[in-house]
Image (cartoon, grey):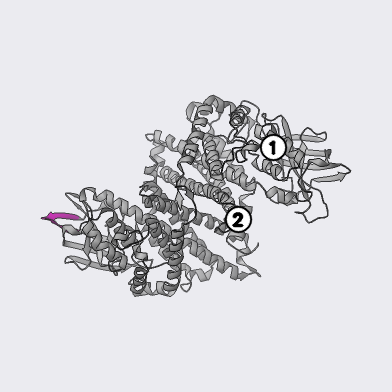
Amino acid sequence: MSIRFDLSEGQALVQRTVRDVLERECPESLVREAEESGFGHSPALWQKLGETGFLGLGIPEAYGGDGSFFDLGVFFEEAGRVLMPGPQLATLAIAGQLIVAEGTEEQKLRLLPAIASGGAIIALALNERDGECRPEHVETRARRDGDAYVIDGTKQFIKDTPAATHLLVVARSEDGFVNALVPIDAPGVSVRRFRVLSGDMLAEVQLDSVRVAAGDVIGAPARGLAALAHALDRGKACLAAQMAGAADALMRKTVDYMNERVTFGRPISSYQALQHRMSQIAILVYGARHLAYNVLWRLSEGTECAGEVAQAKFFASDAYRQTTNESLQFHGAYGYSLEYAVQLYWRRMRLDEVVLGDSFLEREAAAQALGI
Amino acid sequence: MEFSFTPQQTAFREEIRDFLRREMTPEVMARAKRGYVGPYYSDEIKKKFVERGWSVVHWPKELGGQGWSPIEQTIFFEECGYSGITPGGLQNVAETIRIYGSEQQKEYFLPRFARGEVGFTLGLSEANAGVDAANVQMRADLQGDHYVINGSKLWGGSGDEGYAKDNWHWLICRTDQQAERHRGLSIVLVPLESPGITIRPIHVLGSMELLEDHPVNTVCAIYYDDVVVPKENLLGEENRGWYQLMTGLDTLRTNIAAGYLGQARRTLDDITAYVRERKDSPRWIAGSQWVRFQLAQHAAETQVLWNLSYQIAYEAQKGRDAAAESPIAPSHLASMAKIWSADLLQRLSATAMQVLGIHGVLARKEAERWLPFADEVQRLARWSRQLSIGGGSSEVLRTQIAERYLGMARS
């Protein structure tokens, strides 16, 4: 081991091929279509990603996958660039990694190949009425009934339900935290969807005496909380990479625009008032990307680093937010117009920042890790 | 991507730490503090470093260096910065002499650099040549076998830093009055004792006698009135001074960024420990969330500087040719690191000042009475203001990043 600030050959290959596929298969028109349809997802794109093996990144070969967790992070950075719609965060980075870490052999053999091929799509049903995305705040109950659990409760602000085949439901039980995979059409599950700022459909999910077989509970409830925290950290690290990728792409699009746009006889990119603000964005984007790389690498090595993950996530949120605001401003009225892509980044950033817990939560977690 | 150190590098860091813990006793540091603000240095400390051969550490052993790789240099300077000291600071001067010096110059200066027996003051800035560095007006006119030099320089050290007896001016001056402004400059090495040189101290925010109980080192204005210097004191080629000047800056920047990284880590650790201790005070309870969030923020910002510092070292290690293929050429990373480290140390010290309240303004004995780190925070708060000015102001560097890295149109 040593210091190495370049992608390895394998990582660079992942980056190149993912970028290639996404640039071709995930144009802006697809992003808009997924939004307008309310489905928030493109089955054709998902299938393509399954065929090319990208949905198996971070999953061991024995279970139909290939590539490290870091490679999965590289995928997320590229997905961020093109604003790829879809359930990748919950399915690949959280549920997938939870199963890799905690699943029984039977569960791994059954579920991981299904995820890698694109057949299984999992939504994260964690949030409840306070919207905090903290497992400790979960009120939903899982009552043991023989080998099975019966779950009652209401989940709020749940993303990815239009496309999902399963929900990863987090519930309290007498044995600890139950992380259960529930088919979205299981008896007792009802879903009410509504549109939000990002364009996605979020949902309220009612769980009314939903029966879960023991085989569908991932990991032992006694360590369910820690297991979920580890999986959430992996999700947050991937989300940080995704935001860094999106910010970088938007920054570059905006520079291109500024080089073309002429005012008072000069391209607006030649004005120092704008150059200095843009170079600040460049430093923030560098910071966001490298903090994400740091934690992706550590997690890939199996080193837990909750404080650093929190830092990476709030830093990426701040960098991305500033990039969207400045880019909108530098586009002038076009930035405000729905015809340009800037507003897509601007709106989706607002969900990315809060979907796995907001920056207050992350700053608090980082402060705790500092021992204060 | 990999972000771990090799076992050898970790052992290397431990060795540096052990040395610093053992040798940089509170007494040594207190003596070094006399006259210095920011990271400290002194005769005594210099002697300890020179004895270990830690003077020009990136030079090969046969030149009296250690042959350390850029990563090792970064570790070294980071640890020194954490301990509050900055060894040397003349790497770029030493580097230009090693590369461009005549045989006689190398024979004279290189061993003296290694032994810490020579002092240099940078002679670049002038009244009308700060950010616009190529606007140098100081002139050296060749008359027979010597130059006659006239004009004045600003903001260099006094050359009388106590630990070097043999002090020189590394002088950028105009040797061709007709040439395009970058092309008429040369570097001349001038003994500071030369007749016709007058030195006037300029007191600055970073070194305030008012706040000390002893005389302080200052920056200076250095005036030349028909100073005569032998032609042999020209460094390298006449009228190539601007281009020679750029050499060695990368080495200097690598080491400087690493030192600031160490300082940032130290300040963050100090203020975090202080906050932990004060958890029961009304002041802490009132400001707790703000303090927690600020420190979390600075921790992330410090990690960004870690990335910049070690990536610069990594790129340097890969070699310049290979580095050209990387997405960001090292000079852009260096510009980012320069801007970011200045911002970080300014923000961090501003946060720390606010956390300390009125304790923050204390100096000398009164600060020692109340704070475990005495007056280090207010010293950093004032000293760090020059970080975004000296060595390329943040504004100039931002324009460079915009044009050269982002590809924006020329302003």
User: Residue placed at 79% from the left, 45% from the top?
Assistant: B138
Chain to which mark 2 belongs: B
Q: Identify the disc placed on residue B93.
A: none
Between B231 and B129, the one nearer to me in the picture? B231
Query: Is residue A146 a member of the stretch shown in magenta?
Result: yes
Query: Is residue B289 a member of the stretch shown in magenta?
Result: no
Q: Identify the disc placed on residue B321.
A: 2
Q: Left or right of A94: which side holds B137?
A: right
Q: Residue furthest top?
A: B27
Q: Quick one: label 1 or label 2, which is nearer the N terminus? A: 1
Range shown magenta = A141-152
Amino acid type for the residue under numbered disc 1: Leu
Q: Residues within 10 Å of mark 2 (few under 14, many from 20)?
A: few
Q: Residue furthest right?
A: B144
Q: Identify the disc placed on residue B110.
A: 1
Above or below, A340 relative to A295:
below
Above or below, B392 relative to A122:
above
Above or below, B27 relative to A259:
above
Specify whether residue A136 is in view.
no
Residue B254 position, x and y percent, is: 58, 45
Q: Left or right of B278: which side holds B109?
A: right
User: Residue placed at 35% from the left, 49% from the top?
Assistant: A302
Between A124 and A218, the one nearer to me in the picture? A218
Amino acid type for the residue under numbered disc 2: Asp
Distance from the alpha carbon under mark 1 to that under mark 2: 27 Å
Residue B220 position, x and y percent, is: 71, 37
